Image (spheres, helix red, strand yellow):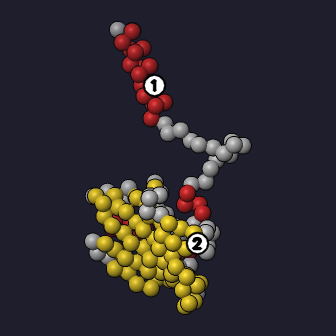
Amino acid sequence: MLKNSILVIALLVFTACASEKPRITAIDGSAIPPAFAQFPDIPFPQESYVDLDETKALGSGESWIGSLAFDTPYNASSVFDFYMSEMPKLNWIEVATVRAKFSQMTYGRNNRVVQILIESTGSDSSKVTITAIPNQNIYK
């Protein structure tokens, strides 16, 4: 009985250790910022993951252009609501939105426009593509 108890406890400890994801750090031991940190002018839902095969972005900060593609563990409707709520907080001005099977949202800020495409990939997941381009119109 005691051996079985010890075996179960040991198994639980090893299982708990195995489920933790290893964290990569810089050479000096500091944390490496997430991929989304290079795009501070765009909000990203937590637990989203960049799709490197589909992402083509140039630059960083608030002047990047190109397309960012990522997967989220949230349904498309929740992601749409997230962007409706969060984009204005970063001073983006809504230009047009369409909530549909493939939702589309367009926002302008300063001399750039972003288009957000949201596609449902399951009941609790979606694919998001954000494309940023320069624009002659100035949104303030």
Which callout, 1 or 2, points at the residue further toward the start of the chain? Answer: 1
Examine the rendered structure and indicate whether residue 94 appears above or below residue 84: below
What residue is drawn where x is 37% and y is 76%? Answer: 104
What residue is drawn where x is 31% and y is 57%? Answer: 124
Q: Tell me if 129 is positioned left or right of 58 in this view.
A: left
Question: How busy is the neighbourhood of tag 2: few (under 14 within 10 Å), some, or many (20 plus)?
Answer: some
Question: How busy is the neighbourhood of tag 1: few (under 14 within 10 Å), some, or many (20 plus)?
Answer: few
Residue 70's x, y, as percent? Answer: 43, 61
Residue 111's x, y, as percent? Answer: 58, 85
What residue is drawn where x is 48% and y is 80%? Answer: 107
Question: In the structure shown, which secondary structural element does the residue marked by tag 2 occupy?
Answer: loop
Examine the rendered structure and indicate whether residue 111 appears above or below residue 75: below
Question: In the structure shown, which secondary structural element does the residue marked by tag 1 occupy?
Answer: helix
Q: CA distance from mark 1 to mark 2?
A: 44 Å
Residue 13's x, y, as percent? Answer: 46, 25
Residue 74 is at least partly visible in this image? yes
Amino acid type for the residue under numbered disc 1: Phe
In the picture, the quarter occupied by the C terminus is bottom right
What residue is drawn where x is 36% and y is 59%? Answer: 74
Residue where numbered disc 2 is placed? 64
Total tally of numbered discs in the picture: 2
Mark 1 vs mark 2: in front:
2
Tell me, yes or no, whether the two marked residues, 1 and 2, touch with CB atoms within 8 Å: no
Examine the rendered structure and indicate whether residue 138 appears above or below residue 75: below
Residue occupying the far bottom of the picture = 137
Q: Tell me if 100 is positioned left or right of 26 in this view.
A: left
Residue where numbered disc 1 is placed? 14
Amino acid type for the residue under numbered disc 2: Trp
Q: Nearer the viewer, residue 3 or 133?
A: 133
Residue 106's x, y, as percent? Answer: 44, 80
Instruction: Name which quarter of the figure residue 11 lies in.
Output: top left
